[in-house]
Image (cartoon, rainbow, N blue to C red):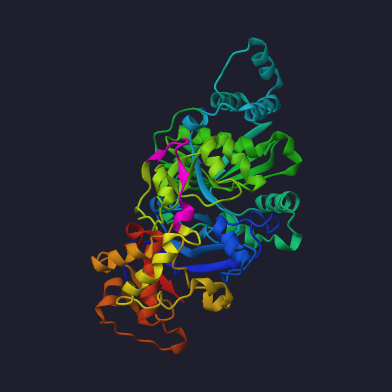
Amino acid sequence: MPLEVSPDTLILTRPIYAKDRNCGYCHGLKEKSYSLKSLQKAHEDGLFGFDKDPQSISIGFQLENISLQDYESLINKGFRRSGTFLYKPDLLRNCCRLYTIRTNLFNYKQNKTLKEHRKNVNHFLKNLNPELNEIKRKTNVKVEIDQEIINAELKCDKSIFYTKFEPPIFTKAKYQLYKKYQMIVHNDEEDEVSEKGFKRFLCDNPFPLKYIAKDQDWELLNNWQKNQQTKLFIGPVHECYYINNKLAAIAVLDILPNSISSVYFIWDPDYSSWGLGNLSGLRELCLTERLNKNWYYLGYYIQDCEKMKYKKKFKGELLDICRSQFVEFGDNLTKIIDNGVLFVISDNKDQNQLILDELELPDKVQTPCIKDSNDLINIAEEIYGLNGGSYLKIDNITGKLKQYIDSYSIQNDDNIFQESDKERLYKIPKIVPGLIPLWQIYEMLESKELQNLNIKILDVYNSEDYYSNSSLWAGNLTQKFDDDDHHHDQEEKKRIVIDMVRLLGPKIANNSLILLY
């Protein structure tokens, strides 16, 4: 029977659990950063088998196809993409706490400390047109910062500055700018920067062809400053910045149904005085507003990473991945996550004395956001700490799961990093913040919700061999393999399905196709 999929079917490989000694943010150079104080002590005392020095640890998979709606939902579960690779960090064991941060123009304007941005914008205006900037200074006319940027660009001589949106395609000019940026700004060696890497990182994307914009869409997008755009434009783009008719920067963006997501920003060090990094964020806030999107996603925020702290100036919200809810990024939350601490927010001070189980994880982001206040407390230690409820209760949960799947009960999370990369690659720990907890998975199995999802598994080496999720627990699989080296048994397929639901949630995992190699 042929395997049928729709253009929006989520097609992806099985998830992997990967460790890398070179963190892309701290590069292993900052002092030891532990998610919780009790885990730091446990590591120092040798109670866990984890490496004593935290390293970059993430969970991810290769995307062959995903709708923009599903990708936008996964951003709200803590995921980001690098080309066609989708990943999220293990915030319990990773060297850095990477929190999803978002904002919009309304939130940004509540920020009372915009002196640095004001200075940046004034310098930009002066570069565009010194005479107009002098007139503004003398007349002392107050104009909103976003309107100043838009007005200046509309009046600017295009030979001095302009930007152009275009498809995320490779060109030699883009690659040369990327290479220069990586080598000078990020200190990459020349042999570390390649055309293939640039294409894979910033040109490739997993979105269906139907999202490719038409000519009229590009025309609207490239004139976004002139009018409020009600037409829904969605898709991956490059916004190319030109100064004196020379390519000076590239903003890599995903324009999604309800938001704009910043993927990466490259700028020419020759134009460092323009402050293009901060300027791009301000312009993308304006673009978000003009395209009638609700949110602008700035990627990840890391409290103890100096090059990431600039994002706080945009007055946004941080994602509490264990509640699937955003928290207003104010002074109290800043104190809570100081020194790179994992946070799970509660406003009930009595809970501080309790041993708490992992929280039930909703399938979509909860609204409204949690307002920052002095009443907020962090209950991550009570859940994930050395004496937290998640570890005290996990053996009981995996014992119950044995009637459906046995692999979790025999897995030892404490020793997972002592295994070889090949042994560990497909073993996601039993306890990971931001994943659906195993007790919730057990309830889904008991209620038949998980078995009733439409998840298909395809063995790539035998295109006629695929299995529906429901048949895995029905015991009626007919396995046909020409090559025993590519054999995946029923227990392994169950584990893959459960891991996918833990990562994606049942709504997105439903109607997906998982590729096995």
Q: Quadrant of the N terminus?
A: bottom left
In this view of the protein, which residue sits in the foreground, 3 or 384?
A: 384
| Spot occupied by residue 190 in the image (x, y as percentages of width and height) | 75, 60
Looking at the image, which residue sits at the far front?
Answer: 353
* Magenta residues, start to end: 368-383
State the residue at coordinates (44%, 37%).
Answer: 375
- Residue 154 appears anywhere in the view: yes
| Spot occupied by residue 197 in the image (x, y as percentages of width and height) | 63, 61
Q: Does residue 370 belong to the magenta stretch?
A: yes
As drawn, 373 above or below 17:
above
**Residue 366 lies in what quarter of the image?**
top left
In this view of the protein, which residue sits in the foreground, 92 or 57?
A: 92
Looking at the image, which residue sits at the far top?
Answer: 139
In this view of the protein, which residue sits in the foreground, 79 or 206?
A: 79
As drawn, 222 above or below 189:
above
| Spot occupied by residue 307 in the image (x, y as percentages of width and height) | 66, 45
State the residue at coordinates (75%, 50%).
Answer: 184
- Residue 266 appears anywhere in the view: no
**Residue 153 lies in what quarter of the image?**
top right
Q: Does residue 90 belong to the magenta stretch?
A: no
Left or right relative to 15: residue 366:
left
Left or right relative to 403: residue 164:
right
Q: Give the number of callouts.
A: 0
| Spot occupied by residue 97 in the image (x, y as percentages of width and height) | 56, 53
**Residue 473 lies in what quarter of the image?**
bottom left
